[in-house]
Image (cartoon, helix red, strand yellow):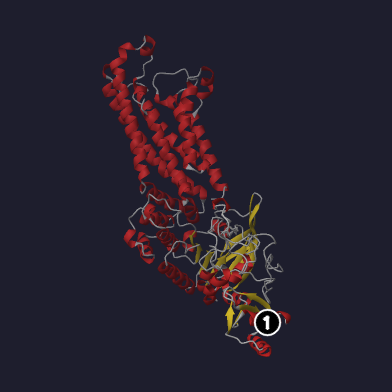
């Protein structure tokens, strides 16, 4: 059991972790989610006694890490896969960690087998790929057969087989009654692995609830409606808006309707004599719910790339979006739902914010209606490639997401 | 098993499982012995051309350690890498997550490295002495002569102390690049140059290398301290570096 109370870490003017309180319970995989730079790694380091909190405290089994007797037998951690001396072989790296806590040499070969590195055990870790490095780091965490395990972004650099493996490994460790605390910036990954979620943004707690509850509270449903032609579509859309529905035109001409249930849409269409080619229920993905929650607190937000310096001064439409143009993937006037029955959280910076970018600002691809594919991090670095001209951005990619929820 | 023995064992595995250990210690030995031997041979051939004053103060023991001015750099690199590579590779976080007792961790690491440095330095000083004397011809001295054994022994201790000093500085600066960037120019250039500038000489003779190397000489110099007093001054520098390194590792975030 890991318990943080009022945990705060200040670096100069930046509050990396801000009054964070949570509990990580044994017997479950607890996902620790947040955008890049939200304070996940800092929190992990404070749990391990590497960084001293500015205020508050964090304990493992009621004891601060630095006072734990024989800590490696109680807590195993993967912090940074590249935190090994590249000149040392995998086996010797693990051997010196094992010797630190009186773990027999036999155990080193065991964990090398568990992570599948037995064939490269005597090779210097300098030549390891990121995935192999992650496996070596995981081996180090498992070495002492600890009751508490911390993994900081363990799936980084792993291939699909490796991701599947670590997912099962974490679930198995938790089913053995251990405390498993895994950080990630990928909601989709956590939805598959974790039982419980702790979501932070800019160092503050945004949510602390089970994955089941998170899905129930945060994934809003919508209906997709398609009519034979635009005229009928507009007719129906007008009527739907009158009764309080939110209607959004998708790229292929279909309507995305929220706030009106399916039978009512069907009845309205019948009254208006509008023929329906499609009327289907959809769930917004968990990824979208997560991005809605964290979009106000991402530190590194991408801007549109106008490529102005690269363009020839020729007539004709320029590439990219014209700044300020309506973004097809954007929900006009959508307000993120205040979650009913959500446990009280200290700060909900997103609550009550109108879900629309500030006027006059170009809409970054990852903003607007959050519909980037699950593999993409919520906030792309500024160098991220812009949407190519003519490629429908969020709205169409969204459909790939729907299976996630 | 206590924490200390566990950490000592682990640090021994660490230090012998990287190549830099062998390379730096071997080059400290080879450079010191080889360069000293070459200088002794040159000195033997040109002894008659020295001024009578230089002939009178000729220190046959000290000249057989002449290669140490270069060889000491290798032992400094060894000291810096042993501590600094923990920081440059990020291994320090893995290590401190396993050993929360940071003082124990640092001093065990330094202890293991010091033993290795001491063995290498003693082998270097004795080999350097005997090789040098063999090449000095009629100008040689013997290990049995007064003060000579002390100087040979002192040369080994001097190199060891430099290694510890380098470890302390690396622990304070937490970066091998930075530590080497400070130590290399200091010992190779600054200290030597200042020691030959009349005004600065009075200060420079209290630098760790100038003070410490007094113990490697048999013929008294103009320094206002004796061989072991000089070595004691160096010891103060080393203690200061160790205290600084300890305070940094204890208080800073890893």
B106 vs A202, left or right, is left
A260 vs A228, left or right, is right
- Measuring from the top left, give residue B233's x and y in whole percent: 50, 29
Q: Alpha-carbon neighbours of circle 1 within 10 Å: few (<14), some, or many (≥20)?
A: some
State the residue position of label 1: A235
- Residue B19's place in the image compared with A244, above or below, is above
Q: Residue furthest front?
A: A315
**Residue B132 visible, this orientation:** yes
- Residue A167's place in the image compared with A108, above or below, is below
- Rendered residue at 48%/51% (across/down): B90
In which image quadrant can residue A135 be found? bottom left
Q: How many marks?
A: 1
Q: Nearer the viewer, residue A229 or A265?
A: A229
- Residue B143's place in the image compared with A172, above or below, is above
**What secondary structure is marked by label 1?**
helix
Q: Nearer the viewer, residue A42 or B246?
A: A42
**Residue A27 visible, this orientation:** no
Quadrant into which the N terminus of chain A falls: bottom right
- Measuring from the top left, give residue A171's x and y in whole percent: 47, 72
- Residue B174's place in the image compared with B150, above or below, is below
- Measuring from the top left, give residue A325's x and y in whole percent: 65, 64
Quadrant into which the C terminus of chain A falls: bottom right
- Measuring from the top left, give residue B59's x and y in whole percent: 36, 19
A165 vs B124, left or right, is right
> What subunit carries mark 1?
A
């Amino acid at each position: 059991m890991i318990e943080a109370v009022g945990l705060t870490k200040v670096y100069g003017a930046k509050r990396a972790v801000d009054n964070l309180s949570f509990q990580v319970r044994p017997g479950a995989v607890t996902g620790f989610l947040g955008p890049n730079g939200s304070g996940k790694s800092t929190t992990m380091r404070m749990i391990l006694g590497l960084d001293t909190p500015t205020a508050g405290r964090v304990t493992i089994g009621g004891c601060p890490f630095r006072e734990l007797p024989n800590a490696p037998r109680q807590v195993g951690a993967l912090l940074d896969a590249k935190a090994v001396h590249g000149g040392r072989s995998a086996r010797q790296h693990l051997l010196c960690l094992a010797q630190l806590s009186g773990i027999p040499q036999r155990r080193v070969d065991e964990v090398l087998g568990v992570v599948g590195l037995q064939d490269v055990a005597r090779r210097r870790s300098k030549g390891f790929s990121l995935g192999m490095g992650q496996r070596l780091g995981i081996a180090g965490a498992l070495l002492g057969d600890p009751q508490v395990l911390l993994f900081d972004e363990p799936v980084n650099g792993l291939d699909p087989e490796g991701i599947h493996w670590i997912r099962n490994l974490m679930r198995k460790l938790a089913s053995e009654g251990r405390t498993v605390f895994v950080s990630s910036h990928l909601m989709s990954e956590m939805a598959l692995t974790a039982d419980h979620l702790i979501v932070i943004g800019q160092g503050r707690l945004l949510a602390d609830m089970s994955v089941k509850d998170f899905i129930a509270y945060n994934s809003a449903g919508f209906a997709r409606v398609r009519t034979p032609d635009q005229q009928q579509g507009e007719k129906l859309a007008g009527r739907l808006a009158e009764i309080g529905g939110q209607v959004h035109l998708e790229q292929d001409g279909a309507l995305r309707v929220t706030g009106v249930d399916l039978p009512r849409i069907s009845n309205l269409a019948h009254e208006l004599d509008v023929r329906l080619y499609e009327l289907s229920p959809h769930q917004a993905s968990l990824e979208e719910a997560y991005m809605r929650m964290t979009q106000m607190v991402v530190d590194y937000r991408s801007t549109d790339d106008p490529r102005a310096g690269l363009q020839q001064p020729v007539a004709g439409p320029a590439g990219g979006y014209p700044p300020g143009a309506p973004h097809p993937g954007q929900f006009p006037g959508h307000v993120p739902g205040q979650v009913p029955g959500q446990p009280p959280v200290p700060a909900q910076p997103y609550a009550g914010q109108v879900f629309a970018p500030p006027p006059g600002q170009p809409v970054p691809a990852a903003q607007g209606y959050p519909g980037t594919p699950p593999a993409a991090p919520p906030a792309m670095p500024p160098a991220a490639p812009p949407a190519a001209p003519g490629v429908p951005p969020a709205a169409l990619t969204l459909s790939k997401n729907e299976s996630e929820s | 098993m206590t924490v200390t023995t566990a950490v000592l064992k682990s640090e021994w595995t660490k230090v012998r499982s990287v190549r830099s250990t062998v390379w730096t210690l071997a080059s400290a030995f080879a450079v010191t012995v080889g360069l000293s031997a070459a200088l002794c041979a040159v000195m033997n051939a040109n002894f008659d051309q020295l001024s009578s004053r230089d002939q009178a103060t000729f220190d046959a023991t000290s000249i057989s350690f002449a290669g140490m001015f270069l060889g000491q750099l290798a032992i400094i690199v060894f000291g810096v890498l042993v501590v600094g590579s923990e920081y440059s590779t990020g291994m320090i976080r893995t290590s401190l997550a396993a050993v929360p007792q940071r003082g124990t961790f640092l001093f065990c690491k330094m202890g293991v490295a010091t033993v290795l440095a001491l063995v290498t330095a003693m082998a270097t000083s004795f080999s350097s002495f005997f090789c040098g004397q063999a090449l000095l011809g009629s100008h040689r001295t013997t290990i049995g002569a007064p003060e000579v054994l002390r100087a040979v022994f002192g040369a080994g201790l001097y190199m060891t102390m430099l290694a510890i000093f380098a470890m302390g500085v690396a622990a304070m600066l937490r970066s091998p690049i930075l530590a080497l960037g400070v130590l290399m120019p200091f010992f190779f250039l600054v200290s030597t140059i200042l020691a030959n500038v009349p005004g600065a000489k009075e200060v420079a003779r209290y630098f760790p290398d100038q003070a410490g190397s007094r113990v490697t000489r048999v013929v008294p110099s103009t320094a206002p301290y004796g061989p072991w007093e000089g070595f004691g001054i160096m010891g103060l520098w080393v203690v200061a570096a160790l205290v600084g390194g300890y305070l940094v590792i204890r208080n800073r975030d890893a």
